[in-house]
Image (tube, helix red, strand yellow):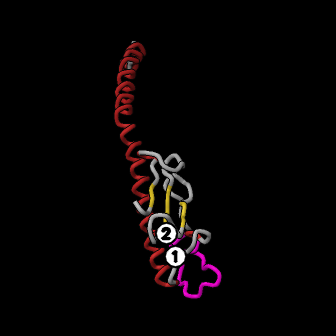
Amino acid sequence: MNTHRRSRKLAQAGVTLIEMLVVVTIIALFAAVVGPRLLNRGDQARVVATKAQLESFMTALGAYKLDTGLYPNTELGLNALRVRPANLNNWNGPYLPKDVPMDAWGRPFLYRYPGEHGDEPEIVSLGADGQPGGEGINADVASWK
């Protein structure tokens, strides 16, 4: 009889299939409601991080221009902030603490000087889709905007 009581207690101590299904359903509903909102926050964070990086580049480019008297041309690009261009004596860099980073989507920034939007260099990230233009998360993030 003693073994019969133990087996009955063990059977009662387990979780029923219905209880397990209820818990899994609650977790799935929670993930369905909260998941997309969290993913959207990640996309917004990438845009904010890219804008902050653009500001950092513009600050470094300003220091570069103060030292050398001009901005690096399109051919030299942002690498001129890390490596001294040939025949440039007043360069006091590096102007960035690390190598030129990629944008928040893992692609290189596009640099152009002279640009089409004023007297300052233009730096662009093509957004999540990597294509020019776009809307929302796919919109370009540009230094002149």
Mark 1 / mark 2, whichever is N-terminal:
1
Q: Secondary structure at mark 1?
A: loop
Residue type, mark 2 in image: Pro
Q: Is 116 situated above or below 83?
A: above
Looking at the image, residue 50 sits to the left or right of residue 100; the answer is: left
Q: Say which residue appears at 55% left-offset and 87% top-offset.
A: 90
Q: Which sits in the foreground, 4 or 42?
A: 42
Read off the residue under disc 1.
Answer: 71
Residue 81 is one of the magenta-drawn residues = yes
Q: Which sits in the foreground, 14 or 134?
A: 134
The spot of residue 60 in percent (x, y) is 47, 74
* Mark 2 neighbour density, 10 Å: few (under 14) some (14–19) many (20 or more): many
The image quadrant of residue 78 is bottom right
Q: Residue 121: which numbered mark, if any?
A: 2
Identify the magenta region. Answer: 79-98
Q: Say which residue appears at 45% left-offset and 64% top-offset.
A: 117
The image quadrant of residue 11 is top left
Residue type, mark 1 in image: Tyr
The spot of residue 84 in percent (x, y) is 60, 79
The answer to whether the residue labelled 1 contacts the one labelled 2, judged by CB atoms less than 8 Å apart, is yes
Q: Quadrant of the N terminus?
A: top left
The spot of residue 2 in percent (x, y) is 39, 15
The image quadrant of residue 12 is top left
